[in-house]
Structure formats: C-alpha cells, structure tokens
Amino acid sequence: MKKFSFKGGIHIHGSAAKKALTTNSQIIIPKDPEYLYLPLNQQLGKPSVPVVEVGDQVKAGQLLAIKDGGFSANIHSPISGVIEHIDFFINEPTGQLSKSIVIKNDFSNQEVEYISRSTEDAMKLTAKNIVDIMEESGLVGLGGATFPTPIKYLGDKKCSAVILNGIECEPYNTADYAIMKNHCKEVIRGLKYMLIASGAPKGYICIEDNKMDVYETFRQTLSGDTDIQVALFKEKYPQGAEKQLVSALLNQEVTYGGLPIDIGVIVNNVGTAKALCDAVELGKPLTHHYLTITGNVKSPSNYYVPIGILFKDLIDDEDFDKNNVLLAGGLMMGKTMYTEMTPVTKGINAIILLEDLPKVGPELQCVRCSSCIDNCPAFLSPTNLAQLVKNNKYDTLNEYGIVACIECGTCSYVCPSHIPLLDYIRHGKLELRRR
Amino acid sequence: MENKMRKVTWSPFAHSGNSVNMAMLDVIISLIPVIIASVLFFRMGSVLVLLTTTASAVAFEYISRLVLKRYNSCQDLSAVVTGLILGLTLPPSTPLIIAVLGSLIAIVVVKQLFGGIGNNVFNPAAAARAFLLIAFSVPLTNWVNPMTSTYVDATTSATPLSLVKTVMMNIKTGDMEAARTAYSVIESNSWGLIKLLFTGEVAGSLGETSAIAIIIGLIYLIVKKRIHTEIVTSYVGSAFLVTVILSLVYDLGPLFPLISILAGSLLFGAVFMATDWVTSPMTKKGRIIFGIGLGVLTIVIRTFSNFPEGVVFSILIMNMVTPLIDRHTGNRIFGKVKVKSNEKK
C-alpha cells in the first residue's frame, strides 16, 4: 500500500499517547450556557458587521452579522435568546481583544426554519448554488486557519482536484478523527458538493496511518467510486499543512507565496466538508463544531459545541485550577490564553490544559547542527533567518524565503541549543509586515 | 479562580528534549571504543596523554570563560570532546607539556577567542594538532609500536602510513621503480597489514590505529543521529577513488587504495573531526562538496607534500571554505523555481 509523505518534518515524541487520551471518547454535547460570546472577527479577513440590535430576540440559526466584502464570513446564532451587547470586548483565541455579540440564552430552543434538501436534490445543485450556500452559512476553513471557504471556489482558475485534509498531525487533537469516524458519509457528500462547486473531476481524502480504522471505513464506503480516492499518509508532523499535503500527494509544489489554487487544487478540512454537507442538506449554517478538550484534565474528550461558548463553561474549575497553561489550538501551533473567559471561535479545534510549559534550557549559541534545516518542511534555513532577525537585517529576510515559513514550530522543537527559532522568524515576519 | 494569571508564551509548546550536552555526551560515548583500543595498545602512554589533554582542555575552557566574563560553558561537555579528540590524534609518546600546549591552542585560541562553541571557524582539535605537528615535528612523529605488537617490519619501524608515504613520495618524484619497490614491501604481506589496520595493532596516533573501534563509534553516532553520514561517505569515498586512480595509473596493485584509506588518521578524521557540526556545512549538498574536497585534498597532501599525513590540513582548509560552501549551497525554498544567480533581484 502506497503511503504518501513529504520531505522534512519530525515525529513528535509521545504523539500517539497524547492522541490516545481522546480517540475512543464519546462526543459530548455540553448543555447550553447562559451567555454566548461571538467575536466579530473570527475569520481570516475583515470583521463581520452586526445586523442585530441590542435587545433583539433571536432564534437559533438566525443571521447575527453579515460579511463585510468578499474576504469575510457571516455569523449566525447557535441558540435562541436576547442580544445583550453588540460591541462587547472579549479575549479572542487569537490572543487579541475583539468586539463580540453577546447573546443571553432564553432556553426556549426556537429555531429558524431551515431549508432542507434531499441528497438527490442537493446533487442537482449548480456550482453557483453551492458557493452561495457556503457564503450564506458563513463557512470558513475549520482546520484552524478560518480562511473563508467560498473564496477558494470563486476564482477564475481552473481546479483539477479537491483535497480533503483529514491528517490532523497535531499531537493532542482528535476532533477531525471523531468527525471522520462518526460522519463518514456526510464528509464524503460534503466533498461531492465541493467537487460540484469547484468543477474538479477528482477528489482526495487524506488520512494519516495512525487512523487506520477510519481509512478502512472510507475505503469500504467509497469502493466503486472512481472520482474520490482515499490516500494514506505516513504519520509525520506537519503532514497536515496544506502545502506539504499537496506536494506529498500530487508531487507538485504550491508556488512560493501562492495558494494551492495556483496549481489547480483546493484543500479543505474534513470538518469543513461535514459543515458544508449540513449546510446544503439541512440548511443549517455554521453554528456548532467539534473540538477536543484534553491534556491534564479529568476526562479528556471530544465535544460538539456551539460557537461562542466560553472555555470556562466547557471545563471544570478544578481542571483550571491545577493547570498553569491553557492552549487554544494544538500543542505545536496553538496559542496560550491568559484567561478562560475566552469564547470558542470557528477556528478552534482543541483546548489543551497543561500543568506547565516544557522545561527548556537557556538559549545558547547555534552549534550549526543543521537539524532545523534538515527537518524544515519548507526547506528554509531557520537558523540563518533567526540570525538575520537578531542582527536587524530585515531586508534580506525575503531573499532567504521567510514567506515560505508555515510556522509549524519544527525548528524550535528540534533545536539542541534551545533557540526559539520560530519566535525570531515570527518577529521578522511581523517587522516586514509593519514596514 | 477568575483572577488566576496563566503562563503565556509562543508556540510550539513542546520540545524534543535534544540538547548540546546530550549530543556531546553521545560523541564521548562513541569515542569509548577508540579509547579502549588505544589504552589496550599503548597502555600508560595513552592514559597519560588522554587525561592530560582532556583535563587541561576543561581547565582552559573554564579559565578562558572566566577571563572573558562569559557564563561557564564547561557543562556542555564540548571541551571534553575537544580534549579527547586532540589526545587521540597525538602519538603515545607525546611529551605531556606539548599535549597541554595543544589544549591551550585548541580551547583558548581556536575556540574561545572566536566566541566559544558555535562560533569557531576551525575545528579546535584539528587546528591544535596541525600547530603541534608544525611546531614540534620531531616528538610528534616519534612513533612507538603497540605493546601487544606482533607485527615488526623487517626494514623500517614505521607506521603503515609511512609505508604508503614512501610509495607516494616516489610517485611525486617520478621514480616509478622506487615506488614499486616501496609498494612491494606492503604487497608482500598486504592482507596481514590490512588485518592489523582493522584491529589497530600498528604504530600510529592513539585513536587512529583501530578501524574497527572507529567503525563501532560511527555506528553508534549513526544510530543516535548525531552525525552527518554524507561527510563520512563522501570523504572516504572520494579519497578511495583518488587512490584507485593513482594505483591504476602507477600500477600499484588492487589493495593499495584500501591500505591508504585504513592507514593514517583518515578514518578517525572522517568520523570524529570532519563531521564536527560547527565547522562543516549546513546543507546536504554542501556537506557532500565538503567531503569530496577533504578526500581529494588529503590524498593530494599525502602524495605531494613533505608531511606524512594530510587529514588535519585538509580539514582545516575545508573548514576555511565552509562559509563559502554554505553561501552557495542553500536549499531550494519550498515552491520556488530555481533561478540563476544573475537573475536574482
């Protein structure tokens, strides 16, 4: 059996054990909280514009904020209730304070009337219809980047393949695994709608070889289907990065600084496919999604949560008290939150509680061991980039290809001198953007 | 609980646990077979020289960091590695004061004055060895036979390398008859010589004699992923190829290349000195160029210079061009199409 893989990358120590915490857990649906906080800029691009007023009564599924231009997304209410604020500042999981809409739950569970379609009807939809549904339902990339999905399908460039990313290479995360395990058929139908929307003849579902059970399920479900291929990948971090995924699968590199569509492919997360299937068939906008709550907690598990629920409402106080580090996102690419008064946004697929940060020695001089270079999935020289940043030579950073950095953290992970290479590179990127 | 402040930092929130002193510890462990072999063959001579170089290297590291007002770097074990490697390149009869001087050159001049580990341009042990060879060539070429030796050459009490060197010298002067006569000394018992070169029961520097001990160390380093194997393979491979060409051109018989590889400090230099992280190039391509340069230079120096051995000199020369190699062998960046250097912005 052919296993795809990319050049570079690492095996994260103890990754299997970390995933094992939540792989076999039931999906928990938490009880609806009293308040939901929906940040207005939870997607990449411009913040959405509220279309409701303070005091308005809203139903579940109702539009709360409309997208501001093309590069933005709609936001819908996950619950029924009353709008308490429309510009309440709250700590967003990106680490910034952001305006948010606050809804007080009235526990009446009223829903708007969703326009549902049968699968046969849905398959007859045109590309335009499906892209419209994506736009209306506020679909964004659920892999973590929250790139507004319809934009990927709107370009003029010809698309030859849609790739569904079910790799999930982050050590603790299993939310995508849970989706693939429990909603195999929805994911496949979601991919079919994506194929219609893109006009691509070929679809791929990418699964890493630490999830053999879902790979087999997909293979059996798709036996006889020639349009969609299930591809097996070697377990390696960061296999789930979209550019590395495309190059491993199709042996074709996304052009420097470009997007996958530049070489005619669209990459979407399996969670996005599931959400699209719900949007097309049930008419439901994106108001709930899956996430993993794990780490040093009493009962690590996967959850199906409304967007806007606070971390505080999802996790026991006891678990919060015994841990010093609260991560939103993965162990390798997530962000630390200073407070549990942080709402779940569309891009958060894991909450990880850790007792403490890893004990890393003081930063030493680079010993030129070249492990960062040998393992960099973007073929960069992180140590050179860090050195340039240290010397304030920002102008030469582009020459050394800083744009190709996907911030996977491999360099910082392997460095024997404990140099926070990625921190230097991020600083360099920020400085370049500031100019 | 509401007011509990959490630790905030940047990703990634995991580390491989890799560290410089673990790497150095692995190098020390990989040197153990070589040390054992040298103690077996040279007894007290080996023990004294190794202890002197190692202890003085650590002492110089400590003192120089103190004088230079930097943090104490002795715990990273790199001074121990330098001291051991320097000791292993010296003959067992080296006067101890010269060994101490070698450590001084290696640690203070070559390493600490350039800024400590990571900043040194030259491999400290190689530079110190080259200095000692030039400054004290008589004591440093005073070879003794191993204590357990059964191999006593009839005409000379020389190292296998000096037999090779005699052949090479005659090639240089164009005296082919003499070269073949010199080679016939080797040829008369070539398999026996090769066997001795593998076990190490020959005269030579402490660490360089036993090929088996060096190969065990190499395997350990490969298993622990502490070594860039492409340097070793391209170094040994290119040196082998060059001697194959030499032996074909001058009709020296099929075993001459193998003997030239095993004799002298080529293997030891390839495994423990050329692969030094700090002074070798950082990309695979660069390391292959580096290794080829080493191989060719070593044989060229052995053949055409007055020095018997070319390993340390070739390492120093290639160390010198490492920044140049690094500059021109950068990896192609993901997604970038290769552009010619004159088309760059």
Image: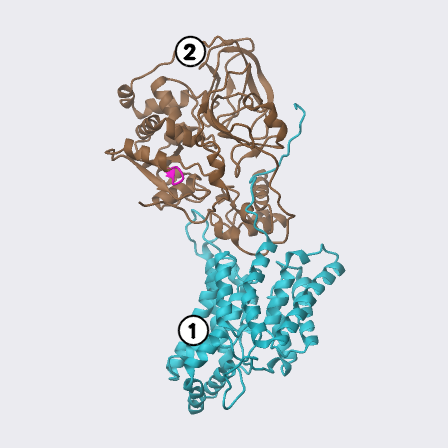
Chain colours: A brown, B cyan
Which residue is pictured at 39% across the width and 84% down the height? B250
Residue labelled with disc 2: A112
Residue A151 shows in the view? no
Q: Is residue A408 magenta?
A: no
Under circle 2, the secondary element is: loop
Label 1 and label 2 in one chain: no
Residue B175: percent from the left, percent from the top?
A: 45, 90
Report the front residue among B148 and A44.
Answer: B148
Q: In which quadrant will I find the C terminus of chain A?
A: top right
Taking the image as shown, residue A236 lies to the left or right of residue A388, namely left
| Chain ID at mark 1 | B
Report the front residue among A435 and A373.
Answer: A373
Q: CA distance from mark 1 to mark 2?
A: 80 Å
- Identified by mark 1, the residue type is Phe
Which residue is pictured at 31% across the width and 30% down the height? A195
Which residue is pictured at 72% across the width and 59% down the height? B65
Chief secondary structure of the magenta portion: loop
Q: In which quadrant will I find the N terminus of chain A?
A: top left
Q: Which residues are magenta?
A: A207-211
Residue A332: percent from the left, percent from the top?
A: 52, 39
Select label 1 or label 2 by which is in front. Answer: 1
- Identified by mark 2, the residue type is Val
10 Å crowding of disc 1: few (<14), some (14-19), many (20+)? many
Q: Quadrant of residue A352?
A: top right
Q: Is residue A209 magenta?
A: yes
| Chain ID at mark 2 | A
Under circle 1, the secondary element is: helix
Residue labelled with disc 1: B240
Relative to B56, does residue A10 appear above or below in the rendering?
above
Which residue is pictured at 55% across the width and 78% down the height? B204
Relative to A426, does residue B22 appear above or below in the rendering?
below
